[in-house]
Image (spheres, coloured by chain):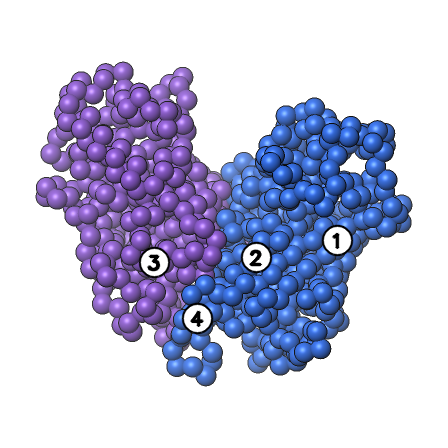
Chain colours: A purple, B blue
């Protein structure tokens, strides 16, 4: 069939994101999205590389293969795609698109880091001394990265408010989101090897949306001195479609001026800022539009930093940007910032709201410009809050 | 053949640890160690579960299977083991015994946490307010967990001494070890499910030695506010033999008195303290004997905490205790403590030494009591420092 692509689809032939899908009664396998259709790649290209429930084998093949497959798909969708390989997106179930190796979360938005600094350390400089010298990051839990749509059970744990003498156990009372962009490693690296900023495109396959759900009360009590742990590890949602870097060429922009100049291993010849516009919808109402182009550190700098000590990477490693926040109030990618620690509620459904309540749904979406002047879509990272387990 | 087991072997029939080995020209597969022999389990038990280069499929089978296989191996080694299934340990290569899912590192020694507190925050209370309420932990890099014997390339990165105005890039000048005990998850748990302290034995298969190599200068500059990252992520060595929990029954001891009493989800009916005695050898000289029985938090409490927020576990997840330090100076499991931040060198090879130099070798070993009054051995976690890459 000829797949019709409306101009405002977001999933035109300049996008062609990859995911893992199944139809009723079939096993999950790799597909590519065009408009409101999913193309079964194993069937359409007659290639067993895609007849598996994970992108990892394809990721491991490297950039030459990614480029070649993208060219073949482009040629395919310009013509008549075999009917048997085409499924309406409404009729498929999407799965986790890749097996996550290690998951690293950065903290690359100056606005976000400054806001959190002001909230948590009101008497000190908003940014810590290391922040402008390196992309601060930490490892998160890879095993709890879940696909969009997975319900998010409210986590329980230890919480201690400043005015309480001792911690108590119970459900989080300050459940939050973090709107982030995540990068999927394709070609790994060996132990002891570094990935320079200039080799970013050789190693990173594509990008997904990330909602790094955060229990702020658990996090505040636990995080010194070793960083966030249970406040983050209960779930991290990602969008089901991996947008290839090759689709993001027209979205590349310079990163903000970096002052002081970073050490040589972090300097970029060809900057990897990205003009990706996010939207955060809370129970259907847009409450924020975080602009990725404002991020201080680029993903190429993140990967160069991550590996400068010789740490190896594997296909399927995921590293995320950290919360995306712009300078404006309605550009903040976490509710703790948007509501200033809960002190300045926002109106959702006509009610003043601060942190997430049971039954709430958060939907992250994002778009980026294409060469033809349209915008491509990243797919959604969605999650609804279920009550804590007894 | 009848395998002869000397009384002081450390690898008698009460131990029977599992590993992954290969002989020249063969593919890695699961073996069990008895005295100075490795028994090829796939061959000896005629079971394809063990004809794979990882313990993970066996781990995923669960405790009933682990107990049954241990009984079969015990019966086997009491008799005549087929010659073709037996290899001298000196003739095999050992590999990473399992595919590491998520790697979590705790901070469960009160002596270690207090020592580091005194070193890093000399004007404050040595323990932070949360320390006695929960086992502090964080996620490490699973992809750089390496088997004993893997050379450790000195990591490079950003370092800034307190008297320096700006960070510089270069090889770590404060390369250290952390002697730890690691626990290997067998039976996982689902998202949203908790593993109570009482279910520890149902979920954890066994234990390995862990050397969590640490670049203290990289760590000191990077670790606020999100915790250790590049200071730890370059390599973590583990011993090749996984000692099953079933072999550690006679090593169980009460944990130290916990005051304040932990919240109910952390209370143990049947404590999981372990009388495991470590030895740290630096270029062949024993410099420390960290006593695991001193650890404040038990591994059952660590796992209960790790999952109390509903985080799921997978077969092959590894969680380690954090540095084991006892009250005595020669019981400290990290050189930063042993040499008090470098101020009190120890003598190694007749020379005063503080942190690791290129060419240094560190060997961790450990033993635990058995019911018959002998001691079982954990195998070694060994690593030699190679110079930083240019």
Image x and y of residue B188, in percent? 59, 37
Which residue is at the front of the view, A297 or A323? A297
Which residue sits at x=26%, y=45%? A245
Asked if disc 4 and disc 1 are in contact, CB closer than 8 Å, the reply is no
Asked if disc 2 and disc 3 are in contact, CB closer than 8 Å, the reply is no
Q: Which residue is mark 3?
A: A196
Discs 1 and 3 lie in a common subunit: no
Q: Which residue is mark 4?
A: B170
Q: Quadrant of the C terminus of chain B?
A: bottom left
Q: Furthest-bottom residue in view?
A: B163
Q: Which residue is mark 1?
A: B273
Mark 4 or mark 1: name the one nearer the start of the chain. Answer: 4
Image x and y of residue B383, in percent? 61, 58
Asked if disc 1 and disc 2 are in contact, CB closer than 8 Å, the reply is no
Residue B222's disc number: none
Mark 1 or mark 2: name the one nearer the start of the chain. Answer: 2
Q: Which residue is mark 2?
A: B151
């Amino acid at each position: 069939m000829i797949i019709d692509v409306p101009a405002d689809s977001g999933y035109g032939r300049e996008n062609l994101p990859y995911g893992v899908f199944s139809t009723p009664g079939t096993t999950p396998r790799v597909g590519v999205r065009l408009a409101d259709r999913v193309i079964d790649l194993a069937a359409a290209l007659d290639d067993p590389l895609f007849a598996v429930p994970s992108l990892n084998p394809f990721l491991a093949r490297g950039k030459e293969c990614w480029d070649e497959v993208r060219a073949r798909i482009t040629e395919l969708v310009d013509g008549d795609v075999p009917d048997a390989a085409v499924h309406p997106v409404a009729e498929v179930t999407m799965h986790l698109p890749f097996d996550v190796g290690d998951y690293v979360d950065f903290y690359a938005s100056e606005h976000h880091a400054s806001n959190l600094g002001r909230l948590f350390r009101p008497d000190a400089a908003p940014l810590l001394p290391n922040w402008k010298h390196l992309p601060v990051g930490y490892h998160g839990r890879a095993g709890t990265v879940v696909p969009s749509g997975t319900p998010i059970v409210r986590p329980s744990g230890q919480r201690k408010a400043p005015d309480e003498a001792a911690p108590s156990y119970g459900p989080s009372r300050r459940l939050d989101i973090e709107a982030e962009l995540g990068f999927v490693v394709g070609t790994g690296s060996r132990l002891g090897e570094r990935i320079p900023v200039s080799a970013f495109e050789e190693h990173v396959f594509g990008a997904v949306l990330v909602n790094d759900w955060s229990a702020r009360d658990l996090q505040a009590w636990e995080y010194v001195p070793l960083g966030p742990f249970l406040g983050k590890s209960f779930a991290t949602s990602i969008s089901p479609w991996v947008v290839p870097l090759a689709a993001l060429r027209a979205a590349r922009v310079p990163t903000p001026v970096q002052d002081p100049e970073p050490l040589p291993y972090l300097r970029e010849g060809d900057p990897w800022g990205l003009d990706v516009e996010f939207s955060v919808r809370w129970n259907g109402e847009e409450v924020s539009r975080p602009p990725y182009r404002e991020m201080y550190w680029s993903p190429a700098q993140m990967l160069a930093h991550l590996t400068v000590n010789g740490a190896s990477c594997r296909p399927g490693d995921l590293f995320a940007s950290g919360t995306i926040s712009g300078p404006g109030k309605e550009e903040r990618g976490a509710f703790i910032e948007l509501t200033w620690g809960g002190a300045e509620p926002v109106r959702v459904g006509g009610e003043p709201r601060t942190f997430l309540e049971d039954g709430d749904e958060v939907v992250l979406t994002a778009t980026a410009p294409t060469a033809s002047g349209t915008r491509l879509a990243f797919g959604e990272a969605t999650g609804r809050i279920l009550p804590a387990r007894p």
